[in-house]
Image: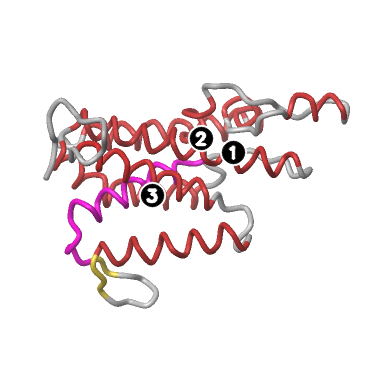
Amino acid sequence: MNDNPIVLSMLIANGLGFAAYLLIGPAMVAGFGLWPLGTAAISAQYGGGIPGFSLWQLLTYGFLHGGMLHLFVNMFALWMFGTSLERFWGSRPFLTFYLICLIGAGVIQLVVATMAADSGSIYPTIGASGAVFGILLGFAMMFPEERLMLLFPPIPIKAKYFVIFYGAFELYAGFTGSMSGVAHFAHLGGMAFGFLVITYWRGRLPIKPQRRLMR
């Protein structure tokens, strides 16, 4: 793990965020979870008690998790795919990529959650899943032929096909409302921003990087 200081730091930061949630309780989510826009007016209308959106929530929401399984799945995926990317890119580009995916996923989820709030459904978003899905997308773009072993069913699949299938499922689940309580559009947002960052680094956007970090 000495070759992966950013992955290690993110694992520790998320662990500390979860510990703080266990110690402090719902107040952590009230202050640092990602809340929709406009909830202050709705809160006043219904007698208060609904937290509002603050800019820092686009970052802090990604260091809170609702349970041990939620934390474990995200951190396992971060370790499994992030270590290869950090070694391939270097720590500073990897951190930049991680944070852009996290904040980008938050922006997309903020739009979706705000639309839901206008219809009377108000909820916070927490978890590093958006950043982790960006990491997964990055892994598939850097190592497309790498074979992954699925758990169900236990068959090998190339990383590029795994991401395509997973992304398609998230898109389907997001638009159909399947698996309620899961931030599907945050996952898609993390993947979308990850794709944009890599495309920019490759010099394939109208705005060119000072130097290309990858082929």
Seen at 63% across and 57% down, the residue is: 180
Where on the picture, by quarter, is residue 117? top right
Q: Is residue 73 magenta?
A: no
Q: What element carries label 3?
A: helix
Label ID, residue 137: none
Residue 73, horizontal then vertical, whole percent:
42, 53
Instruction: Please tell me which of labels 2 and 3 falls first in the chain.
Output: 2
Give the amino acid at mark 1: Val
Residue highlighted by disc 3: 133
Give the amino acid at mark 2: Val
Residue 79, horizontal then vertical, whole percent:
29, 47
Seen at 20% across and 44% down, the residue is: 85
The relative height of residue 110 versus residue 84 in the rendered view (above or below) is above
Residue 191 in the figure: left or right of residue 51: left
Assess whether mark 1 and mark 2 are in contact (beta carbons under 8 angstroms): yes
Neighbourhood count class around disc 3 (C-alpha, 10 Å): few under 14, some 14–19, many 20 upward: many
Location of the C terminus (image quadrant): top left
